[in-house]
Image (cartoon, rainbow, N blue to C red):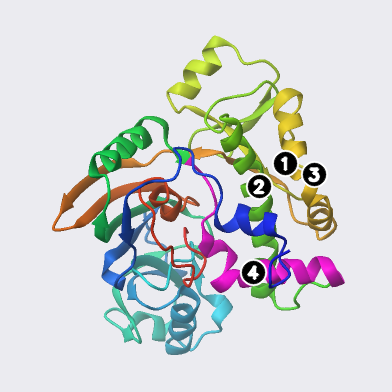
Amino acid sequence: MSESGIPQGWRRAALAPPRAFGAPSARALLKAGPGDFRVEERLSFTPDGGQAHRLLRVEKADANTLFVARVLARAAGLRPHDVGFAGLKDRRAVAIQWFSLPAGRDTEGLAGFEGPGFRVLEVQPHSRKLRRGALSGNRFRIVLRELTGDLDEVQRRLAAIEARGVPNYFGPQRFGREAANLDAVHAWLADGRLPGGREERAFVLSAARSLAFNAVLAARVEAGSWDRLLPGEVVNLDGSGSVFVASGIDADLERRAAEFDVHPTGPLPGSGGVRPDGEAGLAESAALSPLAALTAALDQAGAEAARRPLRVRPASLQSAIEDGCLVLDFDLPRGAFATTLLAEVVSCELDAAGDDGSG
């Protein structure tokens, strides 16, 4: 057990899971300032011109998503839950993200509105409230400062990432400042009581599911099977939520996996859902065995089981080393964490003080 009561195995899976390419020798400073970490959301749709809602494109710096949503609601004379957004973004970053508000007299005046740490860049008419996950992905620009170590190794790692991707771990942001969300999960399992508030309850269930996924992925990384299909795998079709069980892995499936058309998956536990069998099922069951109480509690809490790809490959990856800094530009699909990519490139102190991270 750790000093906070969190089991050490939890802490390792959540905050320090094994790296696919081994521990990097190069070191750098992450998030020396908010401008060193920039992220911009890519919506999965185009605003349709409907009149029921307004989409607000907002730039924020050193402000978390929920705070911005509350300020926008107050400025428009609305309740906080009337405000929609597609994902949470790190506080210690410059983030451009979208919010939605029901159309109204006060909503129309929000073009150019500025609040503490943010400003509204544009307002677009749209027919529906913005829902969580309504993104195709995020574009990142990250500056890592005080870069030291083997720079040739950095380039080799970046080439390997382009070829193979990285393990699709949930980043430390998911588990809260100083692992506070893991403490909340541990307390829930101890006393059987989830928080009463909707947001607090959602954070606990999300952290619990993410912990289980990371534990399974960590075991696959250690076994060297995180980026290949095993017999009985629940296979994900790239860019979709579609999955199927592959009892046998033939040459065509191996080709499609090599081309990143399909991916192996891990569990987001809950009730129902599709589960692996065969070799993949045995590997997953062994990794989840120490978390049996947690997966049972998720089932009883009514969480809906789902699958998540074990790997993710950045698109449009560009890098430059200049003036002691490593500058990275890349796209990730929604739900993927930039910090998991960085962990495969350099060793750095990862800041888990933001909100939920990926979006």
- Disc sitting over residue 289 in the figure: 3
In the image, residue 269 sits, relative to residue 95, either above or below, namely above
Q: x, y percentage for residue 12?
A: 61, 55
CA gap between label 1 and label 2 equals: 6 Å
Circle 2 Cα neighbour tier, 10 Å, few/some/many (<14 / 14–19 / ≥20): many
- In primary-sequence order, the first of circles 1 and 2 is 2
Per the image, label 3 sits on a secondary structure element best described as: helix
Tags 4 and 3 touching, CB below 8 Å: no
Q: Magenta region, mostly helix, strand or loop?
A: helix
Q: Nearer the viewer, residue 69 or 13?
A: 13
- Point 42% across, 36% down: residue: 165
Amino acid type indicated by mark 3:
Ser
- In primary-sequence order, the first of circles 2 and 3 is 2
Q: x, y percentage for residue 79?
A: 56, 84
Per the image, label 4 sits on a secondary structure element best described as: helix
Tags 3 and 1 touching, CB below 8 Å: yes
Amino acid type indicated by mark 4:
Asn
